[in-house]
Image (cartoon, rainbow, N blue to C red):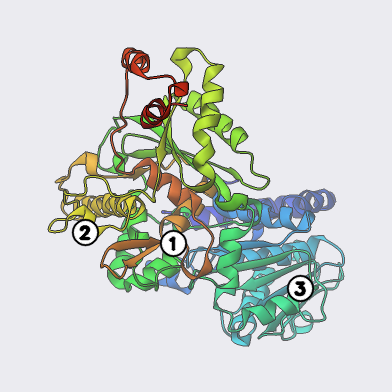
Amino acid sequence: MLEFDFKHPDYPTVFRERVERLNHIRSHPEELSALKLYYKDHIPQFITDWGCTFDPRNVEANLPAIIPFILFPRQVDWVEWVLDSWRNRRPGVTPKSREIGVSWLAVALGCSLGLFYDDMVIGYGSRLEKYVDEVGAPKSLFWKARKFIGLLPPEFRNGFDEKYDAPKMRIMMRKTNSILTGEAGDGIGRGDRTGIYFVDEAAHLEHPEEVDAALSQTTNCRIDMSTAYGLNSPFHRKVTTWPKERVFRIHWRDDPRKDDAWYAKQIDELDPITVAQEIDIDFAASVEGVLIPSAWVQSAWGAAEVLGIVPTGAKFGALDVADEGKDSLAFVGATGIEVDVIEEWSGKGLDIFASVAKSFGLCDEHGYKNFRYDADGLGAGVRGDARVLNEKRDSSQRIKVEPFRGSDGVVDPKKEDTKGRKNEDYFKNAKAQSAWHLRTLFKNTHRAITEFREKGTKDFDPDELISLSTKLDPAIKSKLELELSQPTYGLDTAGKIIVNKTPDGTRSPNLYDGVMIRFARTKPQMTVSSDVVKKSAARVVPRSGGLRGGMQNRRLGMR
């Protein structure tokens, strides 16, 4: 792809280069067929080489409204992901930030496929007709489509004539016999057949279940695209429950034109819910009692680097075991305050021993000597499996496993994690206390980052912050953001904090659980030397010695 400075675009140079390439093509028309064959298999390159987009806001910055459509890397990835979904006959879903260019991408991709492939039918639908096709409305998809094709050089338009080939809700490519169709309302796609069907702003459909039913037999490759809007909608369920190859999240941080200064401006100009939903892709933005607001999560990305902190401290991990074997397992590792390792794997056909072995391997890979695990429910078997694995290792290579039981009582019940309230009076159990501790770390980090950016001050305790490494896999980053802002909190009848990880029927957030367990406040682990064990065992009356001996054995936890 063309190297391009997206923050300081030099559009005249790009147009001059296009003119030079076009003149070469016209001087060597015999090369055009081979070039088209190349572009057929390299659609992102075609869009970058010849496509144009339109933004009237450029005029105020003394830039042209019609500009080259130069794709940035994440946009290229999205186009390739859609093409891969199409070729593998699978649906997909794209949660996105506002003004990231996905609608233009969907249109440019559809037009390009129609120009290069015979007999393509590509559908576009939205909740209202004005968003699909309205005369003179740049916000509508088909206005964008007509503009995209009309601004291509004639050599690539295949004789397209907007007057005859673009009636309402239709774009026809006569040379390839391909067509783009548009629909709106609850019945989009019903009775039709398409190779790909794009549903724009899918989270905002008025009756999404009816749309799902109407599109159920229309296509093998339905692509839902939308900003975030509410929990427990069909769009949100797809984002949170579908396999990772079906979910492609494109966030404002993926856009090289945007930076922290841009984000700060959005915060100043927009209300918090709009920022969270439209920009941060926070589905829980309008939900009351969110434990960790999306804005706090955003502040934590790369916080250590921004604040000049070199992460030091303990290096260890945490394993969250899938609920009932149907969700994913998550292993989260951190160096001091920075989360720098996240692995996730399916819990289907759950084999706890294999998962513990995988966790041991991750510890070896990242230099951890121990990890915590969720000891409630299915995780109860981790300790025994770890013992079996450790028996096969040298003593220096053994991995210590530490149980975390969210159902336990609080740590330091008489102390005050929250000033003015004893822990035993404020938290329902260890899970609520640990969740609140994680919330506090994110809150402290958000405050530290905000004050540093606004005032340049660094008034914080670095050990009371949390940092999320920017080097984590983009797909994991996306899922982590969603899960961290999913749990809500409230009070039980006794006035104690309780946490709901799955509001409105959402799936268990295993990445959140892993982070929470990794940073949980835990009771000190009692260690007993081998000499003490031997001396104690020598004083124990054998089990055959009667009731007293049996009671002593049970008291010492021996079998």
Q: Which residue is mark 2?
A: 425
Where disc 2 sits, the SS reads helix
Q: Residue at x 49, y 70 (%)?
A: 504
Q: Which residue is mark 1?
A: 486
Which amino acid type is marked by label 2? Answer: Asp
Question: Which numbered disc, 3 or 2, marks the residue that appears first in the sequence?
Answer: 3
* In the displayed structure image, the side of residue 362 where residue 207 appears, left or right: right
Residue 62 in view here: no
Considering only vertical position in the picture, is 190 above or below 450? Answer: below
- Give coordinates of residue 185: x percent, y percent: 66, 86
Where disc 1 sits, the SS reads loop
Q: Which residue is mark 3?
A: 216
Q: CA distance from mark 1 to mark 2?
A: 25 Å
* In the displayed structure image, the side of residue 550 where residue 35 appears, left or right: right
Mark 1 near mark 2, Cβ–Cβ under 8 Å? no
Q: Residue at x 68, y 82 (%)?
A: 210
Mark 3 near mark 1, Cβ–Cβ under 8 Å? no
Q: Residue at x 55, y 33 (%)?
A: 356
Mark 1 Cα within 10 Å, few/some/many (few <14, many 20+)? Answer: many
